[in-house]
């Protein structure tokens, strides 16, 4: 069976890893393929050209049809696949969705600092195409 979603995650981020582990445990039908972008084997050419730097800037998912989704849409679809889609129902509410997306963009922008990690430039020293 081909996975319905390829979920690119930052295995070096403690909160991202916690979320990913939660999803993995509940993905009993194996509908999601999880790919750690921090793995030394990560090859952007296998994942629609999504570079390490790009993947670090925002959560990315690749749907079965090849479409790339980002941010909260990746989480919402993941939760839908594991039968907990209702958790992200607020994204469907017109006045809440922009606010939730703004909060997520803030998180994505500052998550390295919030989780006490090096900035992207330092992390990219060995990972990014320069």
Image (tube, rainbow, N blue to C red):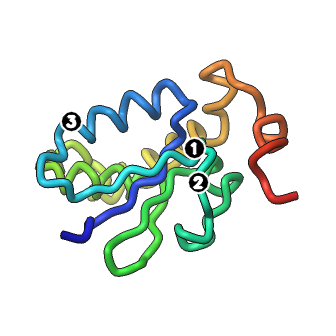
Q: Are marks 2 and 1 in contact (CB under 8 Å)?
A: yes
Q: Report the residue at 26% width, 47% height from top.
A: 88
Report, in whole angstroms, how far the alpha carbon at label 3 lies from the one at label 2: 22 Å
Report, in whole angstroms, how far the alpha carbon at label 2 lies from the one at label 1: 5 Å
Q: Report the residue at 41% width, 78% height from top.
A: 66
Disc number placed over residue 25 in the picture, else none: 3
Q: Quadrant of residue 45?
A: bottom right
Q: Position of residue 19 (x, y in %)?
A: 36, 34
Bin the neighbour count of mark 3 within 10 Å (Cα to Cα): few under 14, some 14-19, many 20 and up.
few
Q: Position of residue 85 (x, y in %)?
A: 18, 51
Residue ranking furthest to the bottom: 65
The secondary structure type at the circle numbered 2 is loop
Task: Nearest to the eye among marks 3 and 2: give it.
Answer: 2
Viewport quadrant of the N terminus: bottom left
The residue identified by callout 1 is 39
Q: Is residue 81 above or below residue 40?
A: below
**82 left or right of 120?**
left
Report, in whole angstroms, how far the alpha carbon at label 1 lies from the one at label 3: 20 Å
Disc number placed over residue 27 in the picture, else none: none
The residue identified by callout 2 is 42
Q: Report the residue at 61% width, 61% height from top.
A: 43
Bin the neighbour count of mark 2 within 10 Å (Cα to Cα): few under 14, some 14-19, many 20 and up.
some
Which of the pair 18/80 is nearer the observer?
A: 18
Viewport quadrant of the C terminus: bottom right
Bin the neighbour count of mark 1 within 10 Å (Cα to Cα): few under 14, some 14-19, many 20 and up.
few
Q: Quadrant of residue 94?
A: bottom left
């Amino acid at each position: 069976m081909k996975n319905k979603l390829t979920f690119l995650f930052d295995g070096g981020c403690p909160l991202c890893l916690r979320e990913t582990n939660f999803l993995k445990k509940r993905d009993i039908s194996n509908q999601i393929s999880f790919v750690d972008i921090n793995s030394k084997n990560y090859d952007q050419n296998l994942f629609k050209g999504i570079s390490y730097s790009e993947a670090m800037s925002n959560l990315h998912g690749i749907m079965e049809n090849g479409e790339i989704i980002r941010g909260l849409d990746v989480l919402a679809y993941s939760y839908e696949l594991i039968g907990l889609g209702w958790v992200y129902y607020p994204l469907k509410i017109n006045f809440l969705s922009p606010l939730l997306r703004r909060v997520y963009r803030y998180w994505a922008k500052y998550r390295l600092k919030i989780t006490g990690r090096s900035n992207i430039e330092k992390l990219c020293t060995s990972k990014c195409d320069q």
